[in-house]
């Protein structure tokens, strides 16, 4: 074919640009694991409870995300890191199960209730917002963290200080289509300034190359994006919704629920909760959260 | 059907966004496609090579790749525009390869003697194409061109995923996944919305086809 | 028609070679046609006579050699070539009238778009030419509604509307029914009588005898004989010409 060469060159140019486009901002800040949960020695539990069963078994299966930086991310070395991971390790430690005896089970959002109900996992710690609809199918201990919708902007942006500041600006805001945050933000920006993609990493790209001025979703996800951006971005830090993250367990297991809550309280009192935060999400966030007020288990 | 009635505002605005996207894209793609078709039959080798490369790239690249390139590569290269513009242009460029080939096949259906006669009386290339060849080619261009344009309207759903937002398909996604409406009725609404656009478009093309057929 | 061109021939073809793939269709062709001369090119099919006609306005390109029209070399593709073609009228075997335009619009297209004549001027001039070729009453019809002879006369009018310096005829009567041949030849003979420079590729012996000043006989891409009509028909020099004539005349 006569035009073979220019065609190949053109394709190569396109491919090159696409690779450049995708490759930006991949700098990882993951370093070695800094948090170790205390492990109880020979704890005793009432016969027949979930705790007794797990302690005797000496292992626990925890459902979590594998792709949520700062909260639950499986590294290339196979090591699990993040705040959700640390919370799970704290709970397991109270059962006398060390971190290396935990079976991790990847649990995407849509499978969380299913895995709990069919016994695939013993509990789910996976940026799991407590809400009524979910509460009908599973039970929640906690919450262990009060997440909320927030805004992420470029580190040098001083004009966007919270959702209210968006009203009078012409800033374009990016979120994931079909998500709850994308609906809530419509209170502050009209349709024409709302840019929707199928993933938040695309929003981060758009923020990086100046197509949008803010990205909005749960602060937990935003902090993860900040950590991957080499501090090109920052989280504004003013949440405008409440997304309590809970530990999902089998419906009706009040004993286990109370045990998880007790474990969280002790961790907060002893300072391991704060250590867990500082070793994970705390690295990109200025604040250290308090353990939120826990729900009753009945 | 209640979903349709309750959300008719969202559907109508989705139809409007899709319609505008397709109108702008349609005009742009007809212009670009015609120019590229002209390149492909040009006597100048560099223009022919450019035209062939253009068609090869855009016809063989998935639309998502073209749109991805528009939305994420151009800003990196310092070219910022609204995602609506990126979507419109991306859709138009992609479709232009098919418009070009539809026009080129029409051009090839006109006997070579017509172009020779036109050149013999001193008409330049552009005049030959515009005054003699294309008017005679239109009749055989319209049917394949119609298919290309209707495919473009349907492809516009993909542009919605690249930040255009608020088009018909994304309206459906929003209603079903963010607002928790049942999926099937929502999608029936989306399908009806596309039919509201494509069926009149098909009728219009049929009308043009008959009109062109008579003018002979 | 124009400046100082009388001392150079209207057409000069020098050492032209042309190949179609591996077949050598023009072999070292040399030809000069002075102003006002009418040349008829004869030869068996495949002899290269049509190609010779088509290279003169660059509908075909040559592989080597040069072609000058009225003293100027043929330009490359582009505006200059279009201008040259406007001065060289061409009539095709298949008429090639613009199928989407009326007969009159066929004739006025070039004058308005290339010569810059007003629409009115071009129509007046066009009607005059259509009258001259005898089809003024068909002016508003489309080509498909005309007989072959009428179409070819319209095609001649279209070429004449550009006021060409020279006319090329590529087998103008070969696609016509026999009863229509004479009406076209009559128009051509009229043109010849008025002093138009003409190169006619044709098998019409009668026309060659009656109207031509000169006859070329081509075979296998070469000009084999270059002589007067009388000379060619009465005393052809080459074996191939004699052979050709005997086959033509016995029919």
Image (cartoon, rainbow, N blue to C red):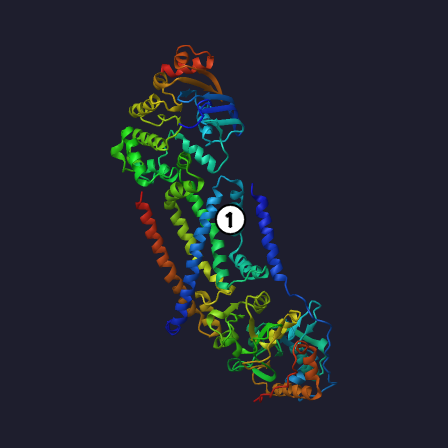
Which is nearer the eye, B103 or B192? B103
- The residue under label 1 is B55
Q: Give the residue displayed 35% in from the left and 28% down from the top.
A: C175
Question: Callout 1 environment at 10 Å: few (<14), some (14 to 19), or many (20+)?
Answer: many
Using residue A2 as the reference point, say whether residue A98 is left or right of it.
right
Which is nearer the eye, A110 or C16? C16
Give the quarter of the figure containing the N terminus of chain B. bottom left
Using residue B151 as the reference point, say whether residue A15 is left or right of it.
right
Percent position of residue C158, x then y: 34, 33
Percent position of residue C180, x then y: 29, 26
Q: Can residue C220 be seen?
A: no
Outermost residue, front side: C3
Placement of B160 over or under A12, stated as above or below? below
Percent position of residue C207, x then y: 35, 19
Q: Give the residue displayed 38% in from the left and 61% down from the top.
A: B197
Placement of A269 over or under B156, stated as above or below? below
Label 1: state its secondary structure. Answer: helix
Using residue C103 as the reference point, say whether residue C171 is left or right of it.
right
Which is nearer the eye, A289 or A75? A289
Percent position of residue A26, x then y: 65, 65
Placement of A136 over or under A78, stated as above or below? below
Specify the quadrant of the image occupied by residue C100: top left
Outermost residue, right side: A41
Placement of B87 over or under B110, stated as above or below? below
Q: Can residue C66 be seen?
A: yes
Give the quarter of the figure containing the C terminus of chain B. top left
């Amino acid at each position: 074919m006569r035009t073979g060469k220019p065609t190949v060159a053109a394709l190569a140019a396109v491919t090159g640009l696409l690779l450049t486009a995708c490759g930006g901002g991949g700098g990882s800040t993951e370093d070695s694991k800094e948090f170790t949960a205390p492990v109880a020695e020979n704890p005793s539990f009432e016969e027949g409870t979930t705790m007794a069963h797990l302690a005797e078994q000496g292992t626990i299966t925890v459902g979590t995300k594998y792709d949520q930086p700062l909260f639950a991310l499986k590294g290339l070395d196979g090591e699990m890191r993040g705040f959700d991971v640390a919370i799970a390790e704290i709970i397991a430690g109270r059962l006398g199960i060390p971190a290396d005896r935990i079976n991790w089970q990847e649990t995407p959002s849509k499978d969380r209730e299913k895995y709990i109900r069919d016994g695939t996992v013993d509990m789910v710690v996976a940026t799991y917002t407590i809400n009524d609809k979910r509460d009908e199918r599973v039970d929640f201990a906690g919450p262990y963290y009060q997440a909320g919708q927030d805004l992420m902007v470029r580190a040098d942006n001083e004009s966007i200080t919270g959702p209210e500041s968006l009203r009078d600006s012409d800033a374009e805001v990016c979120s994931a289509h079909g998500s709850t945050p994308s609906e809530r933000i419509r209170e502050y920006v009209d349709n024409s300034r709302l840019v929707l993609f199928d993933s938040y990493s695309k929003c981060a790209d758009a923020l990086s190359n100046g197509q949008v001025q803010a990205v909005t979703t749960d602060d937990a996800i935003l902090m993860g994006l900040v950590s991957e951006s080499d501090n090109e971005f920052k989280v504004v830090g003013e949440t405008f919704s409440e997304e309590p993250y809970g530990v999902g367990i089998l419906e009706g297991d009040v004993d286990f629920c109370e045990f998880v809550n007790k474990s969280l309280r002790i961790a907060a009192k002893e300072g391991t909760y704060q250590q867990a935060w500082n070793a994970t999400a705390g690295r990109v966030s200025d604040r250290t959260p308090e353990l939120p007020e826990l729900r009753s288990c009945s | 059907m209640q979903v349709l009635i309750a959300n008719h505002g969202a559907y109508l605005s989705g139809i409007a966004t899709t319609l505008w996207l397709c109108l702008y894209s349609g005009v742009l793609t007809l212009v670009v496609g015609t120019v590229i078709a002209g390149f492909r039959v040009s006597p100048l080798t560099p223009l022919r090579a450019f035209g062939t490369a253009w068609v090869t790239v855009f016809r063989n690249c998935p639309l998502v790749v073209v749109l991805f390139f528009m939305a994420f590569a151009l800003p990196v290269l310092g070219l910022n525009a609204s995602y609506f513009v990126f979507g419109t242009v991306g859709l138009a460029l992609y479709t232009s390869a098919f418009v070009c080939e539809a026009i080129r096949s029409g051009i090839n259906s006109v006997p070579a003697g017509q172009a020779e006669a036109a050149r013999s009386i001193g008409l330049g290339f552009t005049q030959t194409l515009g005054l003699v060849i294309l008017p005679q080619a239109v009749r055989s261009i319209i049917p394949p061109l119609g298919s290309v344009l209707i495919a473009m309207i349907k492809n516009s759903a993909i542009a919605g995923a690249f930040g255009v937002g608020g088009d018909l398909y994304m309206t459906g996604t929003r209603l079903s996944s963010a607002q928790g409406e049942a999926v099937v009725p929502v999608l029936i609404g989306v399908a009806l919305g596309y039919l509201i656009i494509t069926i009149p478009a098909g009728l219009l093309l049929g009308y043009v086809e008959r009109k062109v057929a008579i003018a002979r | 028609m124009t400046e100082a061109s009388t001392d150079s021939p209207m057409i000069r073809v020098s050492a032209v070679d042309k190949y179609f793939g591996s077949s050598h269709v023009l072999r070292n062709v040399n030809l000069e046609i002075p102003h006002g001369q009418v040349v008829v090119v004869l030869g068996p099919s495949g002899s290269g006579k049509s190609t010779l006609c088509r290279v003169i306005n660059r509908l075909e390109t040559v592989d080597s050699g040069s072609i000058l029209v009225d003293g100027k070399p043929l330009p490359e593709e582009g505006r200059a070539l279009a201008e040259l073609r406007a001065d060289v009228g061409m009539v095709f075997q298949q008429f090639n009238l613009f199928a989407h335009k009326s007969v009159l619009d066929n004739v006025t297209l070039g004058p308005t778009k290339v010569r810059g004549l007003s629409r009115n001027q071009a129509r007046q001039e066009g009607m005059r030419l259509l009258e001259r070729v005898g089809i003024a009453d068909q002016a508003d019809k489309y080509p498909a509604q005309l007989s072959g002879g009428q179409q070819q006369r319209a095609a001649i009018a279209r070429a004449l509307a550009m006021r060409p310096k020279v006319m090329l005829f590529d087998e103008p009567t070969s696609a016509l029914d026999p009863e229509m041949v004479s009406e076209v030849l009559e128009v051509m003979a009229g043109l010849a009588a008025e002093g138009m420079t003409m190169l006619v590729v044709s098998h019409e012996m009668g026309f060659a005898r009656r109207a031509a000043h000169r006859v070329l006989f081509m075979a296998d891409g070469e000009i084999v004989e270059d002589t007067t009509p009388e000379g060619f028909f009465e005393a052809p020099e080459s074996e191939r010409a004699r052979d050709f004539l005997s086959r033509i005349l016995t029919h």
